[in-house]
Amino acid sequence: MPTIFIDGQELQVKDGDNILEVCLNAGLNLPYFCWHPAMGSVGSCRQCALLQYQNEEDTEGRIVMGCMTAVTEGARFSVSAEKAAEFRSAVVESLMLNHPHDCPVCAEGGECHLQDMTVMVGHRDRRYTGTKNTFRNQYLGPLIHHEMNRCITCYRCERYLSRLRRRHRPRRPSIARPTVFWPPAGRRTRK
Amino acid sequence: MDYNVIGKAGSRMGTGTMIILDDQTCPVGMVLNLIRFFAHESCGFCTPCREGLPWTHQVLLDIEQGRGQPEDLETLAYQIKYIGTMGNTHCALAPGAMEPLQSALKYFYYDFKQHITGGRCPYH
């Protein structure tokens, strides 16, 4: 059982865990999108950033992604460091550049992971003045409703489908199409 | 000339190509062209690059076309810090895109200022 330090707090952790899992288990508020307990890490959303220090003398630290960093004996991290908190806020601001602002009428409003994470990191004011990208929705089979304009590119749908495809390949032709994330189909824009 | 020297000057050797601009060419337009290329090339895998590069492109386009605001320079500096740091993105594409912008802001700051205060590109 390795021992790690998060914001000075000593934690006994399970070998093979990543730092995001450790933080969530310890009740620390570290936002995330693409990591999922059943599907693991891909490191695409860059949301679970925190600072890692080389040793006790290191005060600068460098930003690492919690979900992509395995626990090692004596490793030192900071969730509350200003640099990491600013970066996490910047990631949410980025995700909100193209995400619609119609929370009050959205079916997910109130139980939305993006909403929760936005509140958690404290992002509020929009600086981007350009247009938003719009996308065409794709049919991903009967199990997933696809709303690409609201996509935050966590790849969970694609990862879920690829698991299903591996299991049910001959019987489920409807989920055999590849999921397309980028670039926006048709490249239309709206204000 | 080698990789380290170019790195210290604030750019990358890349494929070893050099573009030489005369004093009649707008450095803001040149950087805009580079950022447009990188924003288009972004694979979209990670958030800072996918969203940050098109945002940077939009800010630079506004500046180049005379719609720039004084706070746009702060936005550019913020983008350089946010997506230009290695480790913040999944690969080196976005930091590589930010390096020419960073050195342009350092060496041609007056040109950026002129675009914003004059409301047009002073080169054409």
Image (cartoon, coloured by chain):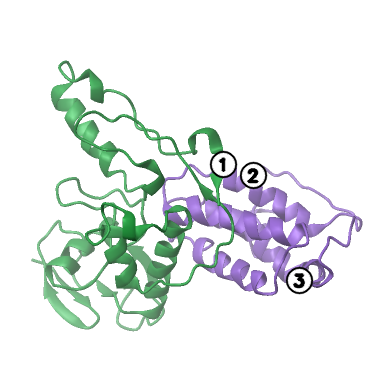
Chain colours: A green, B purple
| Residue occupied by mark 1 | B41
Measure the C-alpha gap from mark 3 to mark 1.
26 Å
Same chain shared by disc 2 and disc 1:
yes
Quarter location, residue A91: bottom left
Q: Position of residue A93 (x, y in %)?
A: 44, 64
The amino acid type found where label 3 is placed reads Tyr
Name the residue nearer the viewer: A24 or A103.
A103
Judge left or right: residue A120 versus residue A183.
left
Q: Position of residue A68 (x, y in %)?
A: 28, 56
Q: Position of residue B48 (x, y in %)?
A: 46, 57
In the picture, which quadrant includes the C terminus of chain B? bottom right
Q: Tell me whether the residue at label 2 lies in contact with that at label 1, contact meaning CB atoms closer than 8 angstroms.
A: yes
Numbered circle sitting on residue B37:
2
The local crowd at label 3, few if under 14, some if 14 to 19, many if 20 or more residues have their Cα within 10 Å, is some
Q: Which residue occupies 38% across, 57% down?
A: A102
Measure the C-alpha gap from mark 2 to mark 3.
22 Å
Pinpoint the chain carrying mark 2. Answer: B
| Residue occupied by mark 3 | B109
Same chain shared by disc 2 and disc 3:
yes
Name the residue nearer the viewer: A105 or B121.
A105
Looking at marks 2 and 3 on the same chain, the residue that comes earlier in the sequence is marked by: 2
Quarter location, residue B107: bottom right
Asked if one can make out residue B96 in the rendered structure from this viewpoint, the answer is no
Q: Secondary structure at mark 2?
A: helix
Judge left or right: residue B123 versus residue A114.
right
Q: Which residue occupies 77% across, 69% down?
A: B116
The amino acid type found where label 1 is placed reads Glu
